[in-house]
Image: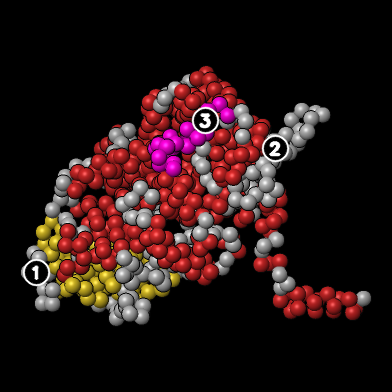
Amino acid sequence: MALLETSKYSQGSVLGSVNPDLASERQTASFSVEKLTALLDGGVEQTRIRRAVVDAIESDPVFSRENQYFQTQNERYEAAVKKAVHLQKKMHEMGWTENGPEYKYIYRALSGDVAFLLHRVFMRSISMLGSDKQIAKWIPLATQHKLIGSYAQTELGHGTYLQGLETTAVFDTATQEFILNTPKISAMKWWPGDMGRSATHTVVFAQLYVHGKCYGIHPFIVQIRSLQDHSLCPGVTAGDIGPKMNFEHIDNGYLLLKNVRIPRENMLSKFCEVRPDGTYVRQGSQKINYFTMTSVRISLIADEVLTPLMKACTIAIRYSVVRRQSKLKPGEQEAKILDYQTQQEKVLPQLAAAYAFHFTNDYLQELFNRGYREIQRKNFDMLPELHALSSGFKAMITQHCTAGVEICLRACGGHGYSLLSGLPSLYTKILASCIYEGENTILLLQTARLISSTAAKLQDLIQSGVKKHDAWNQCTVQLVQAAKAHCHYIAVKNFAETVEKLETKAGIQKIMKHLCDLFALHGIFSNTGAFLHDGYTSAAQMDMVTASYLDLLAVIRKDAVPLVDAFDFTDKSLNSALGSYDGQAYQRLYEWAQKSPTNQMSPAYERYLKPLLHNTLSKL
């Protein structure tokens, strides 16, 4: 069975056979892997569509990631642009559209390293915040790539705190234009993706001034480069911010504006507009400007956060059954490292979290779609809840998943540190997600404005004469803890409710129940202090939690490989020498290492080593 299946996943495996240590794990699955994959995808038909998209993309040599680990920053940027341009052609060829069922699988299939991701955020901003007339003008241009968009919110001096942004847009009634300026260095836009070298237009968030009065932050469409020769427009200074910890394929940029004039029609005006005479009109909530961020946060969880954790679990768990080390019992062969309880305790809670957050993401997606429908009807009642939950979950899930990927990397020992394992790039990619679209601590404090448990402490401080803002600051560490606990509680509750609804056949409900229990118990086990301190549990109950938690590890261990197989990543998608479907980790590491350009003769020999060696030898 396992051998037959390899062709579905494995692209030209080294030996053409599956490592017996991995094959044996698949023969004892307590559930149907194929049915679980369909459950995760949302149905058999979705699985079929996703696999067709993956197949079309992976069989196209332009999208190959074969030498990605050996490329320079410039090579990665160029490859990302090449792929983005080719993708348009591919979509046209395949008949895929932005609204079609295939669209959501394209970026998962490409596995990152593709340019123009901010172009999607640019379009989303216009769709959400633009008037019907603006949508009719800009969206077709953007869809046909007659322009390339970016999203310029973050500044050198401010990120998530929108009220603090310093870029200004002053309305000139005489010419019916807005004049945009970045008045000082801290106001310079810094970090927007695709802006350093690619974008021609961007949505700039700036403080709106009319007749000397400030109306707060508003979004404006600004052209930054010529559509003829790509040169910078008058008054615009822009470029690339240089190398980063990852994302070298993205030209994160800086932008300075000096008296840049744009027409009145370029202020996105679905909810706010400036009339020709300078009258300011607003419909609904000022908070609507946060809505693009809310939507990006929710889509980010699926694309940028869950996938890396699922991939890391797949790599670490497959490697943990082909890596043998030390003897568990005297006289026997060396044991698979996944048979050690300490290894199970590292990787299996991460696997449970990946499943938990997959279902949390479904729940958030549903909530967001409901909220979006309401906002379309100009009903803003759900905005505060959407903002709070998207903030809290973005923070909690990115934090949890980042820690999880790091644990998986370290669980693979020395080989995990090699770029060829696929784990370091998953880690540096996911680490960034804790920071962009809102730094996590700030986001948790946004969520905490819901929580009443700290209210008592706040009241006490205020009554004892502490100013309100100082009182808030003195509670922030506890508020962050409370917000995390609140989000964790919702994740557990949602996982449990999802499991309840599952069909009992095919063994899926049973294994999902085990994962749900492990996720919940791990939450208690790793926060024993809080549970004991608040009196939720006694010491005796904590012993029971620990015992149940450790027992579950051994149960889930039996199904660990089938559980990661159900994520259904191809070898090309994992791009990992350690985590391939056939488990031939050592052969693949050696094969890939030989492709490294560093194995060509280096000029360092002629320049430095030869003189050194020959000089020393002559003295001898």
Tell me which residue sits at (66%, 67%) in the image: 597
Pointer 2 or 3: first along the chain: 2
Q: Is residue 267 visible?
A: yes
Q: Is residue 544 above or below residue 490?
A: above
Identify which amino acid the numbered label 3 is placed on.
Ser
Residue 286 position in % (x across, y down):
19, 53
Quarter of the C terminus within the rendering:
bottom right
On the image, numbered disc 2 is attached to which residue? 20
Identify which amino acid the numbered label 2 is placed on.
Pro
Q: Is residue 156 visible?
A: no
Residue 526 position in % (x across, y down):
51, 33
Residue 588 lies in the magenta stretch: no
Taking the image as shown, residue 320 lies to the left or right of residue 514, namely right
On the image, numbered disc 3 is attached to which residue? 32
Q: Residues within 10 Å of mark 1 (few under 14, many from 20)?
A: some
Q: Is residue 371 above or below residue 27?
A: below
Pointer 1 or 3: first along the chain: 3
On the image, numbered disc 1 is attached to which residue? 276
Q: Which residues are magenta?
A: 29-48
Can you tell which quarter of the image residue 139 is in? bottom left
Q: Label 3's element? A: loop
Residue 58 position in % (x across, y down):
51, 55
Residue 40 lies in the magenta stretch: yes
Extreme residue in the top direction: 540
Taking the image as shown, residue 164 lies to the left or right of residue 178, namely right
Q: Main secondary structure of the magenta part?
A: helix
